[in-house]
Image (cartoon, rainbow, N blue to C red):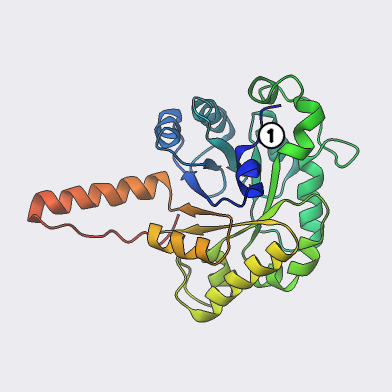
Amino acid sequence: MRANALRTAWQRGEKTINGWCSMPTSFGAEVMAHAGWDSLTIDMQHGLVDYQAAVTMLQAISTTDVTPMVRVPWLEAGVIMKVLDAGAYGVICPMINTAEDAERLVRWCSYPPRGDRSFGPIRALVYGGADYPENANATILKIAMIETVQAVENLDAILAVEGLDGVYVGPSDLANSMGHPPRLDPTVPAVIEACQDICRKAKAKGLYTGMHTGDPTYTAKVLSWGFDFATIASDSRLMQAKAQEVLQIARSGTAAKAEMSSY
């Protein structure tokens, strides 16, 4: 089976940078993939992407060695199994708040005997290879989003779920849940401390850790905290920021930094 390059990099202790695809376009995904990200996540939760668009985007990403992942809309067996059958090499699932939620995620991402994933890897066989069925459980990344006070309170139990590979901090929802304004790059000390604590506890349990950021300077900061990977904004936000920058230069001759406060 085709190796999961993210697993390989993290096992070597390397940090990786994840791109985020929120626009439902295969060409956009192809352009992002050729930009040199280590991985790309197709966002089916807050992005404008449905299943059919996600399939074409996975195909576009496959023109490179970039690792394809999908953030599913919710903890729901059908969509999780379909994106895996389409060739996703990692599933990021939002709003994992309990150990029971994390167990469902692992089970629905895994073939028996570990899980309940139905067999029918129609495109995954093409992308992953003929021995995909035998190796999928050990190759696919199963990543739980930790983004609520409830999840933080249940973090130890979530991290103890066998087969969970990692956690991904959603800073906007986490801040919101803690009673602070939602933003990708936290400035509130309590939110920052919560993000760092999630990372420390997950790493202590041998799990991989990721976090969403809005600005590359904050990305570097997050990686310095010990996170294995971080996401920078999204395709739509990066396009918007660059458009604002070139327009500002054209109109005034001076550059202006665009604020990327959400996905």
Q: Is residue 165 above or below residue 154?
A: above
Q: Can residue 180 be seen?
A: yes
Quarter of the picture holding the C terminus: bottom left
Using the image as rendered, state which of residue 162 and residue 42 is in the foreground. Answer: 162
Q: Determine whether 47 is above or below 99 in the image.
A: above
Q: Is residue 214 placed above or below 136 in the rendered structure? A: below
Mark 1 is surrounded, within 10 Å at the Cα level, by few (under 14), some (14 to 19) or many (20 or more) other residues, namely many
Instruction: Check disc 1 and report its element: helix, strand or loop.
Output: helix
Farthest left residue in view: 252
Residue at horizontal 88%, vertical 36%?
112
Which residue sits at x=58%, y=63%? 226
Q: Is residue 127 left or right of residue 57?
A: right
Determine the residue located farthest toward the bottom in the rendered image. Answer: 189
Q: How far from the left and from the top, in percent, is residue 248? A: 16, 54
As shown in the figure, which amino acid type bears the numbered disc 1?
Answer: Leu
* Foreground pick, 51 / 143: 143
Quarter of the image that includes the N terminus:
top right
Q: How many numbered callouts?
A: 1
Q: Position of residue 137 (x, y in %)?
A: 78, 38
**Tag 1 residue:** 84
Measured as percent of width and height from the top left, residue 235 is found at 40, 44
Q: Residue furthest right?
A: 113
- Residue at left 77%, top 68%? 156
Can residue 148 be seen here? The reply is: no
